[in-house]
Image (cartoon, rainbow, N blue to C red):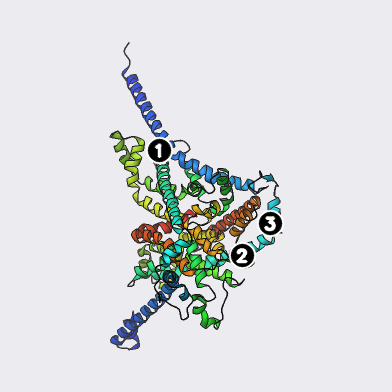
Amino acid sequence: MAIPASAGLNWAGRLQRSLYRDLVFRRSIYGVIFVVPALLFFLVFSLYPTINGFYLSLTEYSLLKPPRWVGFGNYAALPGDMLFRQALGVTVTFVFFSVVPKALISLLIALVFIADFRGREWFKAAYFTPVLLSGVVISLVWKLLADPRGLLNIVLAPFTHGRQLFWLADPHLSPALIIAVDNWAGIPFYMMVWIAGLVGIPREFYEAALIDGAGRVQAFFRITLPLLKPTALFVLVIASIGAFQAFTLQYVMTRGGPNNHTTTIALLVYQYAFNYYRMGAAAAVSVVMFIVIIALTIVQVRWIRSEETSYV
Amino acid sequence: MYSERGAASGVSPNRVRALSRLLRAARLLLLYCGLVVGLLLFCVPTYYMVTTSFKDESEVFAIPIHWLPHVFRPDNYPAAFRVAPFGLYFVNSAFVALSVVLLTLFFCALCGYGLSKYQFPGRDIIFYFILSTMMIPFQVIIIPLYVLVYKLGWTNTYAGLIIPGSVSAFGVFLMRQFLITVPDELMDAARMDGAGEFAIFWRVVVPLLRPPLATLAILTFIGSWNDFLWPLLVVSKNKLFTLPLGMTVFTQPLRQPYWTYIMAVSTVATLPVLAVFVSLQRYFIQGVVLSGMKG
């Protein structure tokens, strides 16, 4: 019996389709093979520690004996823990004075650098150099500068009437110095971020504003600032997340001293875990830090968004 | 603008032009004064680091300040490297950083390629999962991560230093976003020629990925080279110290600091980063600006 022509076509088409599907399927296996190593990595070294961190925070654990369940005991102990309360205060102060001046000063410098002038690229590259130094190198260099006999006191002598200031041993001066050093090291980085944002604003916007008779100040507040919202959000979020985790400067310059006046939350986590082997308590402090960081990020996103609506 | 105003107040145009030129000169002068102040603020500490490394120890706190060494002591460098095995620490740092870079480039490119050019169920969920791990601050998982590495027996090993940093979510994201803009025809053409899927990745995709790979390589190298916290936790044996970790022997409380040596080692520790910066400046700044996204 002859097979109807249409059926034959159908059959051939189906074969073709199934071959194609087979091909795509066989190819997709490779996609899976390519993705699996990285996926496994993130499951083991990101997801698992995140979940295990929550679990460990509910236990007492010294690495030597298996974790012992204590429920919310670690968290309940935190409000009464003087070290934690002090570290919280130190961290909040640090975050504020690390983020706000850094964001503003780097914006000001970026505004200068988008103008045209001779030697601009040269200056920009020179300003950028602190970004090349590692946290440990920055700490050591500033430790030298802040020595009572060091450059900092010599330069500041006219303002301090030649008094020898003990920058790293004074409970008020040492947090201030660390904040200043953090700003020094961070401003060049955020300067580059702001410049990238500013360069991205089309020139036509300014030309149109000029035609409409806007002055430069007006153009800044009406065009530059609103269009810099994404950059501003980026700077604020990244700077705050970084500041909340501040560790290296404090560890190398003062070891959290004098009298824990520079012990940040991150340093406290380290001390709990590796000086007292209280992994559970350390994990609990980490979880609190996580929640605060997420809350702050949400607040900043909301704040920038609400500002946006008022401008448009 | 000025000429209009000048005409209105009856001042000759020549004087107005001279005045405006003077004004512009004054503004320029102000600009450069400000720029020089900034230059001093940002560069003097680094300059002081380098010059101190060549001074005699007796000059470090000399008054008035020695802006250049009066006694030129390049032998501070070999002497500093004898104080502690900084040569070994340097090699350790280089080995760890290069391993981390190679692993990160390979796995991020592979994963980014798999996520952008293949269809399979759950692909987008996997992508968003990887993306979401960027949101977790490192300090938050550092304790459980340490516990994991401890249980794996990786404390005081190169594996402990290298493997937890060997893939970056940001890198996967960067590679995927780049490859999405690349037309499929490039890979299909290679398939027509009978190339296997991995050969296509290696011979077609990797060369295409050169620009984002350069950015990721710089970022990863500097991150690993300068890292302090993770090596501090994982390594306690001297012979595995990385350079930043080894340098903290100088900060141990009861030790008399030997500033010329400290600055010599600091300078050496900065040189590789400086070399990368000078040779790959464009990728470098792009990378640094992007790196914030890593969180």
Q: Residue B23: x, y in percent? A: 36, 82
Chain of the residue where label 3 is placed in the rendered structure: A
Disc ID at residue A78: 3
Chain of the residue where label 2 is placed in the rendered structure: A
Q: Nearer the viewer, mark 2 or mark 1?
A: 2
Residue receiving disc 2: A90
Q: Residue at x 35, y 40 (%)?
A: B201
**C-alpha separation, residue under disc 1 versus residue under disc 3:** 49 Å
Three-letter code, disc 1: Tyr
Q: Residue B240: x, y in percent? A: 49, 52
Q: Secondary structure at mark 2?
A: helix
Tell me if residue B122 comes above or below residue A267 in the rendering. Answer: above
Residue receiving disc 1: B118
Chain of the residue where label 1 is placed in the rendered structure: B
Foreground residue, B278 or A220? B278
Tell me if residue B271 comes above or below residue A123 in the rendering. Answer: above
